[in-house]
Image (cartoon, rainbow, N blue to C red):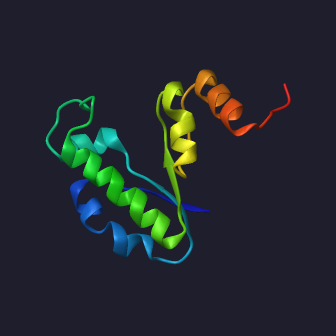
Amino acid sequence: MLGLKIENVRAIANTEMTLRVPGIAFAEWGPGDLGMSFGYKNTPSPHPPEMLEARNRVYTACKEVGVAFLEGGPAETIGERIDGGVRVMGGSPEIAAAGRAHSGRTMPV
């Protein structure tokens, strides 16, 4: 399985072309490193417009070619992200529980 982290200004500029390569299973946008590529010493929160535009560009390109878009986030927004077609990744037990509760999935203990 091949996944991509699209996390600098050059990668964002080539997002659509890159995601058309056959065999890519997923992509994520990498806000930490992307923020540094935009010149931020620390990842700004909330994300500034140029970072949100980059996130949306990766998300849209993934949807257009049928590649899964991975993204994390706080437990409070996981349901909204899942409903938007995001494949939720990483995080914490709380995030996993919120995702399972929202989607109705169970996991053996």
**Nearest to the observer: residue 104 or residue 87:** 104
Decide if residue 67 is on the left or right side of residue 104: left
Placement of 72 over or under 75, stated as above or below: below
Decide if residue 34 is on the left or right side of residue 106: left
Decide if residue 61 is on the left or right side of residue 25: left
Residue 19 placed where, x, y %? 43, 70
Residue found at the far right of this picture: 108
Placement of 106 over or under 6, stated as above or below: above
Quadrant of the rendering where the C terminus is positioned: top right
Where, by quadrant of the figure, is residue 39 drawn?
Answer: top left
Where, by quadrant of the figure, is residue 36 drawn?
Answer: top left
Residue drawn at x 81%, y 33% is 107
Could one spot residue 11 in this view of the protein?
Answer: yes
Residue drawn at x 42%, y 57% is 59
Residue found at the far top of this picture: 94
Q: How many marks?
A: 0
Could one spot residue 7 in this view of the protein?
Answer: no
Residue 65 placed where, x, y %? 49, 72
Residue 102 placed where, x, y %? 66, 34
**Nearest to the observer: residue 23 or residue 75:** 75
Residue drawn at x 51%, y 25% is 76
Quadrant of the rendering where the N terminus is positioned: bottom right
Residue drawn at x 57%, y 73% is 23
Where, by quadrant of the figure, is residue 100 drawn?
Answer: top right
Placement of 75 over or under 105, stated as above or below: above
